[in-house]
Each structure stands twice: as C-alpha cells, then as structure tokens.
Image (cartoon, grey):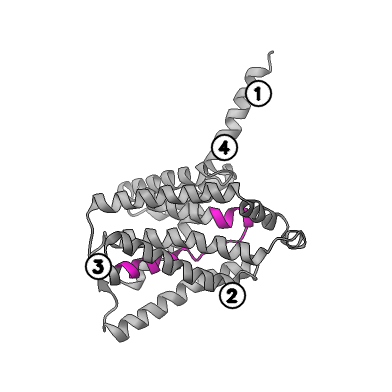
C-alpha cells in the first residue's frame, strides 16, 4: 500500500504541485489500469500488461487534458472529479451490456511479483519527477503556477506543457492500477474507480509537504501507517479519529511533516548559533 500510494502521490505532485491545478482524476487513470489488467493479464505477459495500462491511461489523459486544461481553478477540479464518475458509469454500463455482470475476474500474480513490479514503477516515478523538475518543463510548470498569463507571454506553450505533464503522470497511475488489480481475484467499477484514489494522494501530499519529492513519499508512508493502525485498533471510530488527526495536521503543519521538520531544524541550528 505504501508503494502504491507513493506512486500516486508523487505523480500527483509532479503536475499539481507546481501548477496549482487540483486534479482529482487519479482514480480514473488508476481504474483504467485495473481494467486493462482484467482484460489482458493472462493472454499477455504481466510486464506487457503493465506497459499497455500505462499507455491507455496516457492516451486518455492526452484527450482529457487537451479538452480541460484550458479550464482553471475550481472548474478544472470539478471536471476531473466528474471525469472519474463518468468513466465509472461508462465502464459499468459496458460491463452490464457485454458480460451481463457488474465486474470480472482477474488473472492474479504472486505477492512477490506484484511487489517488485510496484517497486520498479515507484522508482521510475521518482526518476521522472526528478528529471521533470530539473528540465525546462519543470521551470515552465513553475512559471505557469506563479503566473500563467505571464508564462504564456514569455513564449511558453502552456497548454502543451500542461497536457504532456498531465499525460506523463497518468502513465504511472495506470501502471500502478494494473499491478494492484492482479492482487485481486475480482474487480468491478466501484473497486477500480474508488474515489478515495483521487482524494488520498492529495491529502498525503499535503500531509507530507510538497517542497520537494521527499515530502510526498513521507506523507504516503505515514498517512498509510496511521490509517491502517487506526482501522485496526479503532474500527468503529476510525473515520472520526482520522479526520481529527488530519485537521490538526493541516492546522499545525501547513507545510506538512517535512516543512515542520525543516522549520524545527532551522530553529535548533539558530539556537545553537545564538550564543556565539
């Protein structure tokens, strides 16, 4: 779970972090990966299925991005949220017409195989994030986030930069979905396109901090651990306690865990230097 959410959170931060565009489409791309695995895992090798899932999610993101990334602010956020609901409904209707059921069985893979596959995708996601941040695309994304009109006037093709980055992040989300699907014997649209997958990466990124790539990874790890601990110890009060913890974290750690750690360390260093 930690690796899965690390992939989704870092991928979300690659695009939404610098641009400020609040995307809630993660569940759509992730869910597409589920269904690619359900259809092709078995007839095709597992590695090929993962690649196909990434490509299908990428194509979907290119189309959606080209149509929606001219929208800004809350309009883009609402559209990406609606996209997940739309894809869920379309897939559900296709399943009803084609298979006569709500879902389908999946050819499973071993825990070890799925773990190593997810680890590789997680490494690729971090590498992609580092390369984008250090490239001209990273600078362009930062400029778009600071002042999109000024970025456009400076010669940056803002639509192209946004669409390509949006599509790149969809690739690893689709791959992650395909891998997780092979650990389930059966899937349906409710499982594949669970809205938690759209909201949790956002919360994990805020929880960990988005100043650099370490924050989202820390956020995913700590957030997942706390969630599982509360669910195990306090199943009846899980949502209430988790909500309170999250609110307190946002109030007292506006820059996330990483931001709090950096601020605390700076104060400690400042205190040590003061007597000199």
Q: Which corner quadrant of the image does residue 267 belong to?
A: top right
Residue wearing tag 4: 260
Q: Which label's residue is closer to the chain start, 1 or 3?
A: 3
In this rendered view, identify the residue nearer to me: 236 or 74: 74
The answer to whether marks 4 and 3 mark residues whose Cβ atoms lie closer than 8 Å is no
In this rendered view, identify the residue nearer to me: 246 or 166: 166
Q: Which residues are magenta?
A: 14-37
Q: Main secondary structure of the magenta part?
A: helix
Residue 160 image position (x, y, % from top left): 62, 65
Q: Which label's residue is closer to the chain start, 1 or 4?
A: 4
Residue wearing tag 2: 67
Residue wearing tag 1: 270
Give the Cα separation between the discs numbered 2 and 3.
32 Å
Above or below, 31 against 268 in this view is: below
Residue 228 image position (x, y, % from top left): 35, 48
Residue 195 image position (x, y, % from top left): 43, 65
Q: Which label's residue is closer to the chain start, 4 or 3?
A: 3
Give the Cα separation between the discs numbered 4 and 3.
43 Å
Q: Which label's residue is closer to the chain start, 2 or 1?
A: 2
């Amino acid at each position: 779970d930690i690796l899965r959410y690390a992939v989704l959170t870092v991928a979300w931060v690659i695009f939404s972090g610098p641009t400020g565009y609040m995307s809630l489409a993660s569940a759509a791309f992730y869910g597409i990966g589920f269904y690619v695995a359900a259809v092709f895992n078995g007839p095709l090798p597992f590695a090929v299925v993962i690649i196909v899932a990434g490509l299908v999610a990428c194509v979907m993101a290119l189309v959606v991005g080209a149509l929606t990334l001219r929208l800004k602010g809350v309009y883009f956020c609402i559209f990406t949220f609606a996209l997940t609901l739309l894809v869920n409904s379309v897939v559900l209707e296709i399943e009803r017409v084609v298979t006569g059921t709500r879902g389908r069985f999946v050819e499973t893979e071993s825990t070890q195989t799925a773990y190593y596959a997810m680890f590789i995708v997680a490494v690729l996601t971090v590498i992609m994030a580092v390369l984008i941040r250090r490239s001209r695309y990273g600078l362009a994304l930062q400029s778009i986030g600071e002042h999109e009109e000024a970025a456009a006037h400076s010669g940056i093709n803002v639509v192209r930069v946004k669409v390509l980055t949006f599509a790149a992040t969809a690739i690893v989300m689709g791959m992650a979905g395909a891998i997780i699907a092979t650990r389930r014997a059966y899937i349906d649209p409710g499982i594949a396109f669970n809205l938690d997958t759209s909201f949790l990466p956002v919360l994990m990124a805020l929880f960990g901090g988005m100043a650099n790539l370490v924050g989202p990874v820390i956020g995913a790890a700590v957030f997942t651990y706390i969630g599982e601990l509360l669910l195990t110890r306090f199943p009846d009060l899980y949502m209430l306690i988790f909500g309170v913890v999250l609110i307190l974290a946002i109030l007292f750690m506006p820059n996330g865990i990483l931001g709090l750690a950096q601020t605390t360390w700076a104060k400690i260093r400042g205190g040590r230097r003061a007597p000199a």
